[in-house]
Amino acid sequence: MNESYLTAGGNGFRSWLLTRDHKRIAILYLISISVFFMFGGAAASMMRAQLATPKGDVVTSEVYNRLFTLHGVIMVWFFLIPSIVTVLGNFLLPLMIGAKDLAFPRLNLASWYIFVLGGLLALYAILLGGVDTGWTFYTPYSSTYSNSYVILMAMGVFIAGFSSIFTGLNFVVTTHKMRAPGLHWFRLPLFVWALYSTSVILVLATPVLAITLALVALERLMGVGVFDPKLGGDPLLFQHLFWFYSHPAVYIMILPGFGVISEIIPCFARKQIFGYHFIAFASISIAVLGFVVWGHHMFVSSQSLYAGVVFSFLSFIVAVPSAIKVFNWTATLYKGRIELATPMLYALGFIGLFTIGGLTGLFLATLAVDVHLHDTYFVIAHFHYIMVGGMVMAYIGGMHFWWPKITGRMYPEIWGQLSALIIFVGFNLTFFPQFILGYMGMPRRYHAYPEQFQFLNVLSSAGASILGVGYLLPICYLSWSLVRGPKASRNPWNATGLEWTLADSPPTVHNFDEIPVVDCEPYLYDPAELANVKGDIT
Amino acid sequence: MTEHDPQPGRLDPVAEHLADPGQRLDIARLGVWLFLSTEVLFFGVLFVGFTLYRRSYPAEFVAASGHLNLWLGGFNTLVLLTSSLFVALAVLGADHGDRRSSTRYLMATLTLGLVFLAIKAFEWHQEYQEHLVPGLNFNLPDTDAGWAAHEQLFFCLYFIMTGVHAFHMVAGSGVLAWLILRGWRGRGPLSQTESIRIESTALYWHFVDIVWVFLLPLLYLTGFG
Amino acid sequence: MKTSVLLWIYLLLVVLLGLTIGVALLPLAGEVKPAAAVLVAVIKAGLIGLFFMQLRYHHGTIRLFAAAGAFCLFLLFFLIATDYFTRLWT
């Protein structure tokens, strides 16, 4: 009766592959996205090996094109977009709102299967030889001229998109209808607000990508289509449609990260979050504003200059809610009783690195500056600071924070802290030189470069090796902790939130014996109580 | 809210976490409407693309539209509107737990849906005969190449839009057929689960009808004048 | 929701359909026809949504969800249009 979800109902393949338990589905996603991360990371390693020397003789230019496409497609659609949402979101949303499961449990399982199917198609396309269009699939190259497996890859992404849509749908309905009594909207943890905002984008933006990729695939198949200049079609229409999804997509990727940080910071500063309402509204604002800025990817594409001005202005506006969050997290830290536990290290790293990434986004949003920086390494550094320095660190930090809840085990703290440090150093060494390289004019997606750029490239490649080690370490010690880690108590961090106060570590199948009634605000931390970093042993 | 208090039927064991029937109905409705919102964007992209190209090549698009059969398009619209009426009546029947009435109306809906698809297939066949299918046999004799290219663009959009719409009709028809089978096999008044399924399918069907209501003027009605 | 309401709305929809085809056959100039046709389509869609799909009788959250898709599509069209409509400006 009080068996954990990990063992209840058996442990065979059937019980896992036919589960409707949101927690088990979260684990299924965890395994899948980790596999995809390996593929994406392998591609990145080969790219950095290639770029360590100017002439580039590790792979040919053809293969290099396929590598960066693979890296982008896998990392964006099969790692970053699912990551926090499908692993931490699936696991925690019902727990955080006091529900026994999501609104549509079978749809949740279907989402995972659809995701895996899409992923297998994408991997198959890679196995056959891959795609060389870049993850952005610009027409008419993708629709007419490319000699690679575009249709197969596009179909893989198309299918995976439905996984996103169904997950978002599930989360929205769940948040509206299944909150515990007393848990009105402004008592929800900010992670729930983040998931909700993300889900709105998932639901509304992804269908646009789906139909757009279908149009590209159809054009390739039939030899004629709506992006074909020979028919009077406009390749720029593809770019508009593609970026209409893909810009909100970056908010899909970062918003859940914001949510994780909003949970970690109050806990390890032992302080109520500063400006709860501002952070909540900022999340919704980012979701809405994120839909109206996509043209900043197209400033030099021959889009109308006037449209460029509009998009540039709106892109400045969208930075504001993100900045509000950074201010609020910082204000939460101020005069807090800070404990540098592993999750906190990741969260602090996030704040710094995300801020750099976000500010450099403003450089790119400035029309005149973008003319110089577009398609250079500056752009690459910008988005990696946000996606890797921000999102991935939030993901790893969140995994550490909720690891005892998910697995019932504690990881070795010293290894956690060490890995966080290695990742931070490795990351900056990899990507900071790229800002400079981009400013100096090195273009992106080139397999070779002029000699004068070599020193910075070598620094970047060296950093990548360190970063790789940094990522491998958690995989090792977290796995180790599954069998040898000390058992965790219900609330080893002395954190607030229903998942900590009322659910076991790990939770039972139905999460709660009775649906809780909530009657207090979130984040009621007392600085007198430590987070108890060492973790309780039951 | 349904007007009668139905038996929950054989409740899926996991659904016991949704014990309140009012909540179950609300959740289903929210889910369906959110899904329909995704479909608005899915189809919407095609409409946006069509509108932009129509603005760029007005004369060619008007000429191309003239090749379509307005009467078949109009009649098909009548067919779909009537099928929407029938499915709405099916929902009304389901609201009262009336298995026979709702199943019969669902059959009427499905029949009209199949009539629509048959007429559509006939139209496409006609267009194939007239060499209007891009990628297969598109050819406009005695027409300037540039002009013909823009007419071909119209037909790309025409076939894609009606094709995606027809795909949605087929999917909807499949679900209707399944509901009808279940309707006949079951006994006694409809359970709430069955009633919810019928209402959800009806909402989807209405949406596909609305898409067609917009396709008609854009594709068929531009060409006269 | 009564059967009679559904039947009246259906009748209205058929009349509007007839109207829209009738207008298409009239020799009207320029952009009036497509605009009128689309307007009629919007009215028909509204009738189907409000009555057949029962939006008229549902609470705010459902209407919000229904409106969200339309609003998002509007954003898509409007901002893409700012490109296409201003490309030839000097």
Image: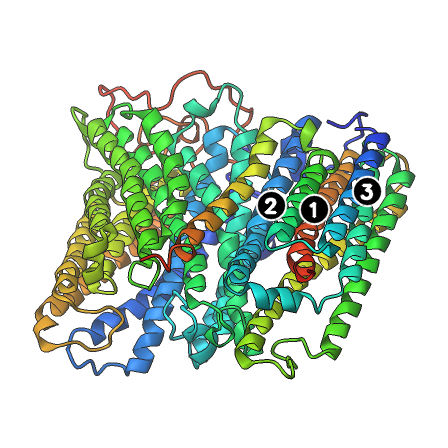
The residue drawn where x is 22% and y is 49% is A357
Give the label on residue A380, or none: none
Q: Nearer the viewer, residue A244 or A196?
A: A244
Give the label on residue B35, or none: 2
Give the label on residue B85, or none: 3
Q: In the rendered view, would you say A182 is above or below C70?
A: above
Element assignment for label 2: helix
Say whether disc 3 or disc 1 marks the residue closer to the N-terminus.
Answer: 3
Chain of residue at mark 3 = B
Q: Residues within 10 Å of mark 2 (few under 14, many from 20)?
A: many
Question: Is A525 left or right of B58, judged from the image as shown?
Answer: left
Chain of residue at mark 2 = B
Say whether disc 3 or disc 2 marks the residue closer to the N-terminus.
Answer: 2
Element assignment for label 3: helix
Q: CA distance from mark 3 to mark 1?
A: 13 Å
| Residues marked 2 and 1 touching at CB (< 8 Å) | yes
Element assignment for label 1: helix
Three-letter amino acid code of the residue under disc 1: Tyr
Three-letter amino acid code of the residue under disc 3: Leu
The residue drawn where x is 29% and y is 48% is A312
* Residue A390 in picture, x, y percent from top left: 27, 48
* Residue C21 in picture, x, y percent from top left: 75, 52
Res. A456 image quadrant: bottom left
Q: Which residue is mark 1?
A: B204
Tally of numbered discs: 3
